[in-house]
Structures are given as structure tokens and as C-alpha cells.
Amino acid sequence: MHDTFGRAIDYLRISVTDRCNERCLYCMPEGYKGWAQKADHLSAAQIVAVAAAASRLGFRKFRLTGGEPLIRADFLEIACGIGALPGLHSLGVSTNGLKLAPLARELARAGVRSANVSLDALDPARYRRITAGAVSAVLAGIRAAQAENIFVKLNCVLMRGVNEEDYRPLVRLSAELGAPLRFIELMPLSRTDVLTGENFLSVEELRRRLDAESPLEPLPDYRPGHGPARYWRDQATGAHLGFIGAITTADFCASCNKLRLTADGKIRPCLGRHGELDLKSALASGAPDALETLLAQAVAQKPENHEFAENYQPSRPMTAIGG
Ligand code: SAM
Ligand code: SF4
């Protein structure tokens, strides 16, 4: 499908839960406890039904996220259902990696081919301060996923004065593992207080810094996983470094190819704008094509750009929307 700006939309990112086993500084709002009612979440069968409708419209790429998707007890049922869709091009998961080691084999069997693993710091104390988790479990998870031939990418959110000392060690790890590393600009999602002039670090500033230390060569045609990152290769180590500059990259939205399905059954045309369409009545109606009609409406409503630069105030946590 194409939206009104001529972009091909074939990627559905699905938040399967708004809950998480970490508490990242920039993501989980203070005191947030998730929904009182788990019944607000879509069931596994409903999620697969939405993905199947998207697939009939030509969507070929699916990513399961959250919150932390791997804490959902029926996660494998969802992955298997989507993994079996005809014409599927890719099924990935975005995870903090804590539960990746015990689940990697079953994920691969279910059809998961890629994992984006959040890794904001390698230093165990800093990792714990940022996320409240244990970095050793994440590293074990990454290696377990790679052992199952799951393609791993690493995600690091940039925070000036918080994890700057970790960027070079992460580049080295990326080269060692053969896993592309993406640096992500802090966005005003879930909470705005963490995104201040003091701790915001743009991808361009970091790219220049890394380039000055060790030259980077642009890779204009490299686009693993069809995400928004622009890639460079660190010539010294061979690491593939992606830069996701949602705030400062002028034409960031030009390559947008996705819709989001929220954990509570809303279709969100844009991460950085508030509009959502409610899928629950379409799911309940059972009418033929009801889901396809709603998904097509959401594609038609995709705005040209996000509105982060226009004093955007979050109203829904990132965990519900699906990062
Ligand atoms: N729990 C999984 C994880 O951490 O990868 C999946 C969900 S998380 C919301 C998905 C991605 O969103 C992660 O890479 C995380 O770092 C990123 N993220 C969350 N809040 C963010 C923010 N305020 N700015 C930039 N990226 C953010
Ligand atoms: Fe949880 Fe991921 Fe948000 Fe961290 S970024 S709190 S791991 S959902």
C-alpha cells in the first residue's frame, strides 16, 4: 500500500504488552504500573488476526515489541501465528534481551529472524543505573540468539553525560559480534523530563566525534531490517554503525514505511503524533474486511512528518505504543 505522500507502507510494528521487566530512565514513566486490567491487551489470536489482515493488504514485515515482548506468556503463540503468514518477508523482535538466552531456540523455531536488542551501556553499574537490569544476562541473550542464526542489531539511546563512555566499547562489541549498532536520539516519548538541552546528544555530533577518532565510511545502500537508520562503517574495526536521528534529521520521515498496533488494540499511523484508530470494534464485529478497511484508513491518515519539534507532549507511554 502507498500513503498519500507516495511512501510504500508494508511494515507493522506490534506492541504485545505495555509491561516491562526493566525501568529505563527515558521510557518507563515514574510510578507507571501498566494497566490494572490485563484484559485491555489484545489476545494472541486477535494480534495474529490483525497481522493476517495487514498481510492481505501487502504488509510483509512485522516486528513484535512492547514494553518487553518476551515477558508475555503466550509470546511464542503470537510469533508462530505471524511466522506462518504467506508472503512474510521478515519477523523480528525488539527486546531488552534479559529473557533472550532461554528463549532463543524457540524464537528461531517460531520464525523470528531478527532481534533488535537494547544495549545502552556495557559497564554493568551504568547499565543497571539506566535500566535497573543486569547487562550480563543481555550479553548472554545476544550470543544465544546469534547461535540460533537470529540476526542481532544493537540499539543504544544517546544521553549526554549518562552513557557517553560506553559508545566506544559498544562499537568494539558490535565489530566483535558482527552485529550492527544503532545510536538513537532521545525522543520525548513517555516522559519529557529526560529530554533536556543538557542531556540531548544529536546523532550528527556523535557521528563526527567517532569519525574524528577513527574514520567512518558512509554506507548509503546498507539498510538491514528496513529501519530508519543511516549507516556508516568504522574503518578500524569494520563495525556497521547506524544513526537514528528522529529529532535532528530533516528528512527523517521520508522513508517511513510503518504502522503501529498498540498493546490495547489501536492503530497508530505515526509514533510522533497522537492520532489513533480503534481496532476493537472491527475485531468484535467479525465483518469481512473490517480490519483491512481500518488498516487502509490508517495508511491514508499517515502524516508527512512527526511533530516532535513542535513541543510534542506525550500522552501515551512508549511501552503501550510500541517502540
Ligand atoms: N523493551 C524492548 C527494548 O527495550 O528494546 C522493546 C521496547 S522499547 C520501547 C523499543 C526501543 O525504544 C528501544 O530501543 C528503546 O531504547 C527505545 N526507546 C524507548 N524510549 C525512548 C525514548 N524516549 N527515546 C528514544 N528511544 C526510546
Ligand atoms: Fe522496558 Fe524497553 Fe522501555 Fe526499557 S526501553 S523500559 S526495556 S520497554
Image: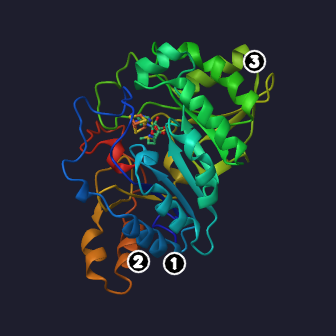
- The residue pinned by badge 2 equals 292
Distance between the alpha carbons at the discs numbered 1 and 2: 8 Å
Mark 1 and mark 3 residues within 8 Å of each other at the beta carbon: no
Residue 89 to residue 323: above or below: below
Quarter of the view holding residue 171 = top right
Three-letter code for the amino acid on which mark 1 is drawn: Arg
Q: Quadrant of ligand 1?
A: top left
Three-letter code for the amino acid on which mark 2 is drawn: Glu
Which residue is at a point 28% across and 36% down the rendered structure image?
311
Question: Tag 2: Cα neighbours inside 10 Å, few (<14), some, or many (≥20)?
Answer: some
Three-letter code for the amino acid on which mark 3 is drawn: Ser
Q: Secondary structure at mark 2?
A: helix
From this viewpoint, is residue 251 visible? no
In this picture, residue 266 sits left or right of residue 109: left
From this viewpoint, is residue 269 visible? yes
Q: Nearer the viewer, mark 1 or mark 3?
A: 1
Distance between the alpha carbons at the discs numbered 1 and 3: 46 Å
Q: Secondary structure at mark 3?
A: loop
Q: Earlier in the sequence, mark 1 or mark 2?
A: 1
Color style of the picture: rainbow
- The residue pinned by badge 1 equals 56
Q: Position of residue 148 (x, y in %)?
A: 70, 48
Mark 1 and mark 2 residues within 8 Å of each other at the beta carbon: yes
Q: Residue furthest front?
A: 102
In this picture, residue 124 sits left or right of residue 152: left
Which residue is at a point 80% across and 26% down the rendered structure image?
235
Question: Which of the two residues, 30 or 160, is positioned nearer the viewer here?
Answer: 30
